[in-house]
Image (cartoon, rainbow, N blue to C red):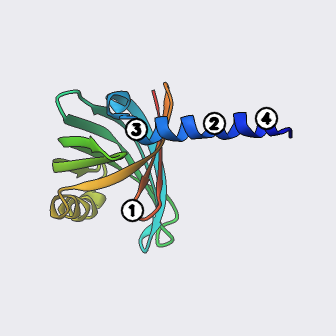
């Protein structure tokens, strides 16, 4: 690489870093997204699939499926979730607050389990995720436990 190429590369990197550091991606995250995430817990592996609408008035609504594969059961348990609340974007972080919602099941045997998960939802009425990547049609968020949430339009 010649000295001119190195200088050009350094200048390009500097411009890119300055644009990223000063950019406000808040306007880009507004709108409907289809998101999915997978994470493990002591109860099994969770897969969350759902739609979230981050509205310009700083309200959000979400609905989708929570699929749980548990070593205790020889099947995948399906639950439905709905949530709504307020959100804000600052310093490449999306913070959701005043979250209310429900978790339910079409299977009566899972009603108690769904109610326990719903209690957990109401006990932690806020959460925060970091914006890792965003494009016109894709977005990747990272939770505090490093769980990735992949979204697309």
- Quadrant location of the N terminus in the rendered image: top right
Q: Which residue is mark 1?
A: 144
Q: How many marks?
A: 4
Q: Is residue 87 left or right of residue 44?
A: left
Disc with the residue nearer the chain's start (3 vs 1): 3
The residues bearing labels 3 and 1 have C-alpha atoms spaced at a distance of 23 Å
Disc with the residue nearer the chain's start (2 vs 4): 4
Q: Kindly tell me whether residue 117 is visible in this rendering.
A: yes
The residues bearing labels 2 and 4 have C-alpha atoms spaced at a distance of 10 Å
Kindly identify which numbered label has been placed on residue 5: 4
Decide: few, some or many residues near mark 4? Use Cα within 10 Å; few <14, some 14-19, many ≥20: few
Which of the two discs, 1 and 2, sits closer to the camera? Answer: 2
Residue 139 percent location from the top left of the image:
47, 37
Which residue is at a point 16% across and 64% down the rendered structure image? 123
Label 1, secondary structure: give it. loop
Disc with the residue nearer the chain's start (1 vs 4): 4
Label 4, secondary structure: give it. helix
The residues bearing labels 4 and 3 have C-alpha atoms spaced at a distance of 26 Å
Q: Residue furthest right?
A: 1
Residue 117 placement: quadrant: bottom left
- Quadrant location of the C terminus in the rendered image: top left
Kindly identify which numbered label has been placed on residue 22: 3
Q: Which residue is mark 2?
A: 11
Disc with the residue nearer the chain's start (3 vs 2): 2
Residue 87 percent location from the top left of the image:
22, 42
Which of the two discs, 3 and 2, sits closer to the camera? Answer: 2
In the foreground, 118 or 10: 10
12 is higher (above) or lower (below) than 140? above
């Amino acid at each position: 690489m010649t000295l001119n190429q190195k200088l050009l590369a350094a200048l390009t990197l500097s411009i890119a870093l300055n644009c990223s550091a000063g950019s406000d991606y808040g306007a880009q995250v507004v709108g409907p997204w289809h998101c999915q995430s997978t994470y493990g817990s002591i109860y099994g592996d969770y897969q969350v699939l759902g739609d979230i609408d981050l509205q310009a008035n700083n309200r959000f609504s979400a609905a989708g499926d929570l699929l749980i594969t548990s070593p205790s059961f020889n099947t995948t348990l399906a639950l439905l979730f709905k949530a709504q609340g307020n959100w804000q974007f600052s310093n490449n972080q999306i913070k959701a607050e005043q979250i209310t919602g429900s978790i339910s099941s079409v299977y009566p045997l899972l009603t108690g389990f769904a109610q326990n998960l719903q209690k957990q939802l109401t006990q932690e009425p806020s959460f925060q995720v970091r914006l890792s990547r965003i494009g016109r049609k894709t977005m990747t968020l990272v939770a505090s436990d490093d769980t990735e949430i992949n979204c697309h339009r």
